[in-house]
Image (tube, grey):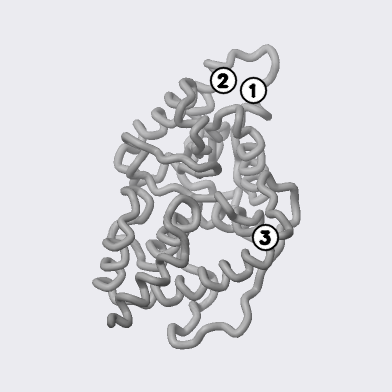
Amino acid sequence: MYIHDTGNRRGRVTPDSTDFLISYNSADATWAEWIAWVLEENGYTVTIQAWDFRPGGNFILDMQRAAQDCNRTIAVLSENYLNALYTQPEWAAAFKQDPTSTKRKLLPIRVAPCQPTGMLAPLVYVDLIGQSEAEAETLLLEALQERGKPTTRPSFPQAAPDQERITAGTVTFPQNIPEQAAEAMTSNTALRLALFQNLASLPGPQFEQILFALDPPPGNVPGAQAAQGHRVKALLDWATSIGPGLDDIEAIYNQIIRPR
């Protein structure tokens, strides 16, 4: 579990400012509240309409104060969010403060199939689609860290683990996985792990060949300046959500590594 140090909040300018404003459409309220709960459970402070905009208040003024006083904004991405009118000024306010994303003021989290366009398209989002609760919580908290460096030494590239560890969720989660899909998920998880290890150890030019063959839309995989492990994870996330799937990546990998 990631524990946020509440006594040393980087970037905090006033005692009343919060770490995050959760920007969401009402259709995704369950996701927004789950994200807010996880963040507060790990020591972050959050402003969310469902909990903090109380009867008798002025919604527009409350949102203005929330956007002004937060350090960062989380956009809960879905088609509902992208098509709504009132969510647009919320993410635009964060974008204006950090147009080059050097401070990562705007953090998109995708909870339903959608494809951001325009000024949102280049932003790398956290993809929670298809994840178990434990995996989604890990992805969410990892995204808040300055670096993606793991807490333990990575596996040696020439040795694959004999057994994979799967951790179950422990609290209410907006996305349930059917029991009949458990066996298929275990197989997919093993393939995902093997692909991650193989792709992360590839020389840069060969990994670029795989990206060229798959041609993921802009914004789904970070550029070459990012760590290769982070790029591999983004590629696998895209492939398993709206992309061609892990089997296609495996086939292209085998074709490049072992050409006929």
Residue drawn 62% across the image and 46% down it: 39
Q: Are marks 3 and 2 in contact (CB under 8 Å)?
A: no
- Under mark 2, the amino acid is Asp
In the rendered image, residue 166, in percent from the top left (x then y), is placed at: 66, 69
| Residue on which the image places disc 1 | 53
> Relative to 76, is 157 above or below?
below
Which label sits on residue 127? none
| Residue on which the image places disc 2 | 62
Tell which of 237 and 185 is nearer to you.
185
Query: Does any portion of residue 113 appear in the rendered image?
Result: yes
- How far apart are the two marked residues, 3 and 2, measured between alpha carbons? 43 Å
Circle 3 SS class: helix
Q: Residue furthest bottom?
A: 158
- How far apart are the two marked residues, 1 and 3, measured between alpha carbons? 39 Å
> Relative to 244, is 112 above or below?
above
Q: Give the mark nearest the N terminus, 1 or 3.
A: 1
Give the quadrant of residue 53.
top right
Q: Are marks 1 and 3 in contact (CB under 8 Å)?
A: no
- Under mark 1, the amino acid is Phe
- How far apart are the two marked residues, 2 and 1, measured between alpha carbons? 7 Å
In the rendered image, residue 81, in percent from the top left (x then y), is placed at: 50, 31
Q: Quadrant of the C terminus?
A: bottom left
Q: Are marks 2 and 1 in contact (CB under 8 Å)?
A: yes
Q: Quadrant of the N terminus?
A: bottom right
Q: Residue furthest left?
A: 205
> Relative to 20, is 143 above or below?
below
